[in-house]
Image (tube, rainbow, N blue to C red):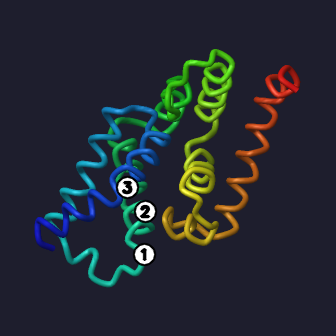
Amino acid sequence: MSPPDLERLYDEHAQALFAFLLNFTRSEADTHDVLQEVFIKLARQPELLDDVREKRAFLLRLSHNATIDSIRRRGTREKNHEQLAAESANAFATVSDPDERAFRDSLASALGELPPDQRAVIHLKLWERLTFEAIAEALDIPLNTAASRYRYGLDKLRERLRPLYEEIK
């Protein structure tokens, strides 16, 4: 892969990968590190892309795996899951309307409370608008697992956000 090809690949997919990774890592610094790691790997091993049909799905899987590896390197999975849930990274653009800001903060907080696996599937389904088949391929999980993580995650979000919904209804 030539440097211009890698640059084009980055330009086409980095923003979506960054949003996905930020939602997963809950840390901009970690997100930048993982994204850099993914593209360094591609620069060193361009043959990874040789038989890839869906580049975005492949990059999502590569990013997801790199994130998991990063989490494992930092310590036990339980310790990191607690830390990720405690941090409140704002995945939404800032707004001036206080009600909209409160809603977005509540949603970001609720997303942060989800297990990372459910949060990843929900992000890919709602923000990336991927099908369950594409999500399953990107995360290297069975199709039914992707669908059930989505369903369980949505159930948890509904329960967590129900008081806010009742208040604004």
Mark 1, residue position: 54
Q: Marks 2 and 3: in contact by CB < 8 Å?
A: yes
Residue 61 bears which disc, if any? 2
Residue 164 bears which disc, if any? none
Image quadrant holding the C terminus, namely top right
* Residue 126 position within the rendered picture, expressed as x and y whole percent measured from the top left: 62, 51
Crowd class of label 2 (few under 14; some 14 to 19; many from 20; radius 10 Å) = some
Mark 3, residue position: 63
In the shown orientation, is residue 88 left or right of residue 53? right
Label 1 vs 2, first from the N-terminus: 1
Taking the spot 33% from the left edge, 61% from the top edge, the residue there is 12
Give the distance between the C-alpha atoms of the residues marked 1 and 2, in whole angstroms: 11 Å
Q: Element at badge 3?
A: helix
Q: Element at badge 2?
A: helix
Q: Is residue 19 above or below residue 14?
A: above
Taking the spot 69% from the left edge, 18% from the top edge, the residue there is 99
Give the distance between the C-alpha atoms of the residues marked 1 and 3, in whole angstroms: 14 Å
Taking the spot 11% from the left edge, 71% from the top edge, the residue there is 2
Label 1 vs 3, first from the N-terminus: 1
Mark 1 or mark 2, which is nearer to you?
1
For badge 3, the amino acid type reads Ser
In the shown orientation, is residue 30 left or right of residue 92? left
* Residue 122 position within the rendered picture, expressed as x and y whole percent measured from the top left: 62, 50
Report the front residue among 10 and 86: 10
